[in-house]
Amino acid sequence: MRNVVGILLDRKTYLGIQSKQTGYEQIDLYNQAAEKLGIHPFYMCLQHTSGNSVLGLCFENKRYRLIRLPIPKVIHNRAMSLSPLLHRNLNLLASSSRVFNRRNRYDKLFIHKLLHTKESLRIHLPTTLAYSRKHMLEAMGRFSDFFVKPTNSSLGEGIIKLSKQDHETWRLFWSNHQPRVVSRDKALAFIQEKVGNQCYLIQQAIMLATYRNRPYDLRVSVQRGDKGIWQVSGIAGKVAAHNRQVTNLGKGGEAKRCEELFRESGFQPDLMKEAIDKVSLRIAEYLGKRLPEMADVGLDVGVDLLGHIWLIEVNGRDQRYEFKKLNMEDTFYRTYETPLVYAKYLLNK
Ligand SMILES: Nc1ncnc2c1ncn2[C@@H]1O[C@H](COP(=O)(O)OP(=O)(O)OP(=O)(O)O)[C@@H](O)[C@H]1O
Ligand SMILES: [Mg+2]
């Protein structure tokens, strides 16, 4: 079979394909895009690879067929939960195939440091420090508001925010609890207990623009497409729930069209979108140079009250669901098609 593109999924997603229980992964859209592009999608998971072949599901003539195929030359990785054994299988696959987004989980501090080496991007990076008692004291001296966050993906979990109340006390925001006003030492002790021996970072808080008094940020999908060129596939807004400091949809955040948010904050929607496109592209292009297998990222981008653009974090496996929630069907489709356009380019290269 020619023009086969592997789509590597977590096992649970893979097993749900025929019963259409694939969680956030919208397999139909890969099928639709593949048909349009004249390629064959071959769904696979790392549990079913052996030697130089893989048992997987091929979609042809509107039906799935379970077949064993040689390892596809190009594979779009969407799998995330990897045990050491699966990791080994992934590395084996990558030794005979071009697996893009092979790595899709990055330490936030690592990404920050990498971007920080590019001087022209620094104005978009909030000051970020590794968590330590020394850096906590430094942050308390330098910032009136800052976040303490796990350095690996967390879906809004484990995030703490501190806001200076007066020079003796801090307001501490944690999970969905009411904020507490505590002394400096109490704040330090509380945070140290939450951090334990996990890896955390400290980050200057951006005074995010608000929608009806609720802070918002943006999810920007940036992907490689034809000829490997990066493009912005879509922008969606996420508004924090009342009295919350994080916009994650899993934490009560609400998806909103960015145009509506920008208008409400007094920004010109078209100009702001253009500015966000430009910054997001520069970020992705730079990351792509340093991490060549990176081809699909979801940036969390904040705009402050003055309209300055800030990068909050980079997600290596964007779930793209804000677009679905907002019924942005063309955009949602594009986030599935673009990686396959890239895959086709790699196949023919
Ligand atoms: N420095 C910051 N300034 C303002 N808001 C922030 C900052 N850091 C985090 N937030 C808020 O908290 C949310 C979650 O933070 P972040 O995106 O860094 O972690 P996460 O979503 O838990 O990680 P992941 O998306 O990888 O699971 C952001 O979308 C934003 O609303
Ligand atoms: Mg995030």
Image: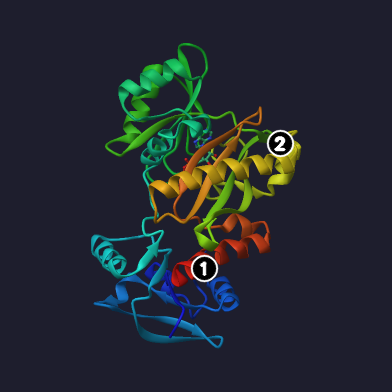
Contact between marks 1 and 2 (CB within 8 A): the answer is no
Residue 163 in the image: state x and y as whole percent: 51, 23
Classify mark 2 as within 8 Å of ligand 1 or not, answering yes or no.
no
Residue 177 left/right relative to 213: left
* Of labels 1 and 2, the one closer to you: 1
Question: Vertically, is 272 above or below 139?
Answer: below
Q: Quadrant of the rendered structure where residue 38 is?
A: bottom right
Tell which circle, 1 or 2, labels the residue nearer the N-terminal end: 2
Q: Amino acid at mark 2?
A: Arg
Residue 273 left/right relative to 13: right
Label 1 crowd (10 A; few <14 / some 14-19 / many >=20): many
Q: Quadrant of the rendered structure where residue 265 is?
A: top right
Residue closest to the far top: 167
Residue tagged by mark 2? 212
Residue 134 in the image: state x and y as whole percent: 31, 21
Residue 124 in the image: state x and y as whole percent: 53, 33
